[in-house]
Image: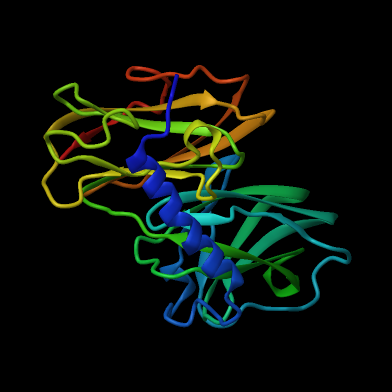
Amino acid sequence: MRFVTPARRLRIAGLLPVLAAVLSCSRDPTASLPSVANVIADVVLASNPNLHGILTSGQAPNSGGPAGTLAVNSPLAVINGGSAQIQVTSGTAFQTVVVFVSGQPDYYVLNLPSAVTSATMLVTISTSLNASFQWQWGVGANAGSAGNFTGAAVTFIPVLSGDIQVSVSWDSPADVDLHVVEPGTEEIYYGNSASAAGGVLDLDSNAACGSDGPRNENITYPSVTPPSGAYVVRLDYWDACGAAATNYVVTIRVAGHAVQAFQGQFTGTGDGGGAGSGVTIGTGFTFP
């Protein structure tokens, strides 16, 4: 049985005032962010990870867009260097998605292969993110016709980073656990949150279905050079916590390598797993 330790309760409890303070704040929390690129590092179509959004200078267009309300399924919280899955749905077909950050210049344009009424994007969050923000999503036949933007407030949860940063985000109250196995076979996860080599699990969310808001976890090497060799990444569905399904995105950042993002879905009730549990994500990675 998985218990919430006092230290873990402290991490969870410490996040709640941050979430409450940000969500109740009425001023623009993005004033210190000079460009959308300091919030969003990349936007890709989930069904085609080779199709990237185009970073465009200036203010986003607002020429009306399709009639009706654009529904945006957005996470409540993100971490610096992580990823998120966003779905936009319109009653009218569109072929272009535009996203910008309120109060900031520049925007991304994602041109889709064909007209659709719903699109899911994987958004990589910048490592430079340092404040909560509100992003605005719009759709149209093309960038010039995009508009009727729909906004969503997103809480920033700061995490540590280093030469290796592995994180996960998900979209339900489930307890999802991130595991990283080092070359020396030591496994970093909720039951071993700090390795002898200096790796740490510094954000652990939804422990034992205690939904605390972030729905993100993060493992990194904040102050040391990680061990050299091959690493394994696992993701465990500890408990569904009543969710019918849970969509996730795992992000792997390794110095000197391209960022990798992997999406998937869990169903079922969960396995209550510990060390060695979970599905293997991708083929892992090597450092350096």
Tell me residue 141's x, y (percent). 77, 63
Residue visible at 88% across and 64% down in the picture: 68
Give the image location of residue 79, x and y in percent.
43, 55
- Residue at image position (47%, 63%) is 18
Q: Say left or right for 228 vs 254.
A: left
The N terminus - image quarter: top left
Q: Quadrant of residue 187?
A: top left
Residue 88 percent coordinates (x, y):
71, 54
Q: Residue at x 26, y 30 (%)?
A: 192
- Above or below, 108 relative to 265: below
Q: Please state which of residues 288 and 21 is positioned toward the viewer in this rendering.
A: 21
Quadrant of residue 273 in the image? top left
- Residue lying furthest front: 6
Give the vertical position of 52 relative to 61 (above or below): above
133 vs 94, left or right, is left
**Which percent across, then down, holds residue 262?**
46, 36
Is 281 left or right of 170, judged from the image as shown?
A: left
Please tell me which residue lies in front, 23 or 249.
Answer: 23
